[in-house]
Image (cartoon, rainbow, N blue to C red):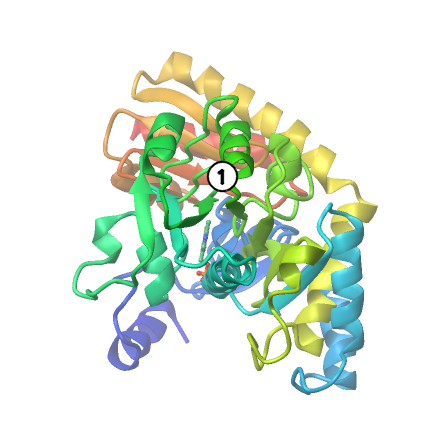
Amino acid sequence: MTTTEIKATATKYIINTYGERQLALVRGEGCYVWDADGKRYLDFLGGIAVNGLGHCHQRVVAAIQKQAETLIHVSNLYYIEPQAQLAKTLIDNSTMDQCFFCNSGAEANEAAIKLARKYTKDQGRTGRFEIITMEHSFHGRTLATITATAQPKYHKGFEPMVPGFRYVPFDDLDAVKATIGEQTCAIMVEPIQSEGGVNVPRPGYLAGLRELCDAHHLLLIFDEVQTAMGRLGKLFGYQAVGVEPDILTMAKSLGGGVPIGAMLTKAHIAESFSPGTHASTFGGNPLVSAAALATLQTILDENLTDHAVAMGRYFTEQLLKLRERFDVIEGVRGQGLLMGLILSIDGKPAAARCIENGLLTICTMDHVLRFLPPLNIDESHIDEAVQIIAKSLAG
Ligand SMILES: *Cc1c(COP(=O)(O)O)cnc(C)c1O
């Protein structure tokens, strides 16, 4: 099918929650994707931080092929070998003790929200169910996670919201302090807000949240749906920012492209999810677990976390050089390979021009071009991206 044909069919039969899209993509290889008309793009959006190893990585493809021929799905009524191996590998490489598997970021956060409430109740701290979340956060699109997401645009029309969430500005410890009360059970935060504009908190903020949680017996939940799996330069974002949460959620790049989410936590907290309290039919099924295991082992074997640090540094330097040529560039924010180019102009047409010129990116919060390239890019990909950005800003 041509782009025009795909678009006509999709528009007619798929509910229009995503609006009109510029492209129909049909094939990918490494850092590149091709549209239905054969045009190639350098993918610096990575399926929104999902394709951490790029497209169709050989080890992930091989693992999926092998698993598809062996066993695709059986449900969690049975033990699943690749799921057990994936869990062990995640835990061996973190300071957490156990995990729960689901299918998406929103579900991982739902699990975290439920666990925080249940654990708090099990501790005898009844009447405490409120979770403090941050303005400009993004936690997903289920009812509980849009409520956790402190952005009114995601609530509109879906009221009433789920009870038990309080909002404070991001990167403001005093606001958190003032909001902790008799009913608080947890604080939930992205170590770096991505969708909210690539917002990096000041040094000491996350450590300050940790201290507040310890002082008030609250759980600290890190939503690492976007920052886990090497994106910030360590396997998990919490390792990169040096603050340990009690509960950690992940999804996007966990499966190397297949849908899988996970929540990791400490043993004493995990106990509150006793048999029958939480479940997922698909969660961590053989196919997605095998894909995630291959993804994780590739990141570890190839030390892509250190590589992400080096590439992030190089990318930042090149983007900062562009600032000398374009005064619409206000700055660069981010860590590792979660990067935002801050513009003084409307970012939407700038992003559209980048795409026309062969670079996939997205504009967030009106002024920020967001880049989430695969961890295994090299300098030549960054040079190519920067050239396209320059050309697009000049236009
Ligand atoms: C994408 C995202 C989610 C939601 O994940 P889904 O898989 O779309 O449900 C939650 N939190 C953060 C930080 C995200 O980036």
Residue at the right extreme of this rendering: 301
Q: Relative to 203, does residue 298 appear above or below in the rendering?
A: below
- Which residue is depicted at the point 30% across and 37% down? 350
Q: Can residue 84 be spotted in the picture?
A: yes
Of residues 294 and 277, which is closer to you in this image?
277
Of residues 185 and 24, which is closer to you in this image?
185
In what quadrant does ligand 1 lie? bottom left
Q: Can residue 135 be spotted in the picture?
A: no
Residue 244 in the figure: left or right of residue 370: right
Disc 1 secondary structure class: helix
- Which residue is depicted at the point 27% across and 67% down? 17
Residue under label 1: 216
Q: Position of residue 284 (x, y in %)?
A: 65, 72
Q: Relative to 165, does residue 163 appear above or below in the rendering?
A: below
Q: Position of residue 79 (x, y in %)?
A: 76, 80
Q: Position of residue 202 (x, y in %)?
A: 46, 22
Residue 81 in the figure: left or right of residue 219: right
Amino acid type assigned to the residue bearing label 1 in the image: His
Q: Quadrant of residue 343?
A: top left
Of residues 187 and 141, which is closer to you in this image?
187
Q: Relative to 156, does residue 17 appear above or below in the rendering?
A: below
Q: Position of residue 212 (x, y in %)?
A: 49, 33
Residue 71 in the figure: left or right of residue 147: right
- Which residue is depicted at the point 55% across and 29% down? 207
- Label 1 Cα neighbours within 10 Å, binned few <14 / some 14-19 / many ≥20: some
Q: Quadrant of the N terminus?
A: bottom left
Of residues 383 and 97, which is closer to you in this image?
97
